[in-house]
Amino acid sequence: MFTPVDTSLGALLLYQGSAGLLQHTGKVLGISSLLSGSVTRPGWENLPIITGLISSIAPVYLFAPALLPKYPSLLYTWEAAAATVGTGVVNLCGCTSGHMLCGLSRLSPRSLIATGIFFTTAAITANLRNRFPSCADDQPCYLPTFPSMYNLAFMLVVVMLSQVVNDFLVPRLRPDWPKASALYSYIAGFQFGLGLLISGMASPGKVLGIFSLRDFSRFDPSLLLVLVFAVGPSLWSWMRLKRVYGNEKGKKPPTFGSMFYLPTATVADIDWRFILGAISFGVGWGLTGVCPGPGLLRTILQPSWGLWWMTGFQLGNFLDT
């Protein structure tokens, strides 16, 4: 079902995690490269974020279990094992977090092209597959549902605490502390994971709902609110950041670092591998409704499916490196 309140608040957490990581560590939150790197090249650059993302399950499980994703039955495990997502993100150099959230908010033409290709491919794949989940009580999925007062209070507290941590507590850490960057990387991953769970983007049914064009009763516009409340604030944060921070002389470095590590590839660097990577990723996303961040959470919450997906993801990365 369409969850305007949950999705909007969760999207703010996605923004807080990704924009905070850029401001405080100078790095872009690209889950695909972090996830693959945590297996092939584990270190302080990737493990804290991945650990934080996994840890985000705990408070939701303990205090608001109704917000945990609802996964479909295990009928199509071959789709989980398909390596198209893994091979796609290698050639595409990113996924929904790196291109759609962080890239679009930086007004990257390359990310706009990537997002357009994999979003279109996912929509075509999902409609050809045509197995969109139905919603509760056989009601149209576009009808809004609202959280209980308890869950609303939980989500509001989480969002406010997250902003307090980013704006007031983290800047007070000693910049010369060697592990400060790793600590905030964990916090950013934790915030991002909470955002995926609360927004519903960890639930494949809600993600696929945006693609339901043949049966409008199963259309769920929640993903559009992620674009509004995650990409929108991230764009504002990026415009503000550019005025004060940067690698140029006279501008501030990241809170816990000496420089920003931003992608340098441009539209001129787009080649056939990039295009095929975007298509491959879109096919995998349209088949399962799962991209790297939600895939990691599903591996923990539903290992009988998620381990197949993770194996396919890592295999796809390995085959294309």
Image (cartoon, rainbow, N blue to C red):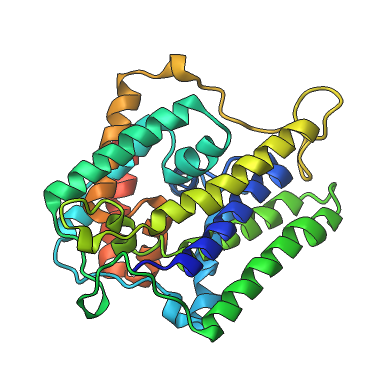
* Residue 50 visible within the image: yes
Task: Find residue 167 and report its horizontal and vertical position in percent.
Answer: 77, 56
Left or right relative to 184: residue 136: left
**Is 75 situated above or below 30?**
below
Q: Residue at x 56, y 23 (%)?
A: 264
Q: Residue at x 15, y 59 (%)?
A: 131
Left or right relative to 313: residue 239: right
Task: Find residue 217 and report its horizontal and vertical position in percent.
Answer: 21, 63
Q: Nearer the viewer, residue 69 or 226?
A: 226
Q: Quadrant of residue 320?
A: top left
The number of numbered discs placed on residues in the rendered structure image is 0
* Residue 179 visible within the image: no
Task: Find residue 95 and report its horizontal and vertical position in percent.
Answer: 41, 41
Q: Quadrant of residue 207?
A: bottom left
Q: Residue at x 39, y 74 (%)?
A: 145
> Looking at the rendering, in which quadrant would you find the N terminus?
bottom left
> Looking at the rendering, in which quadrant would you find the C terminus?
top left
Q: Nearer the viewer, residue 130 or 185?
A: 130
Q: Nearer the viewer, residue 59 or 67?
A: 67
Q: Quadrant of residue 16?
A: bottom right
Task: Find residue 190 and report its horizontal and vertical position in percent.
Answer: 58, 62
**Is 21 situated above or below 241?**
below
**Is 150 situated above or below 50?**
below
Left or right relative to 21: residue 121: left
Left or right relative to 279: residue 166: right
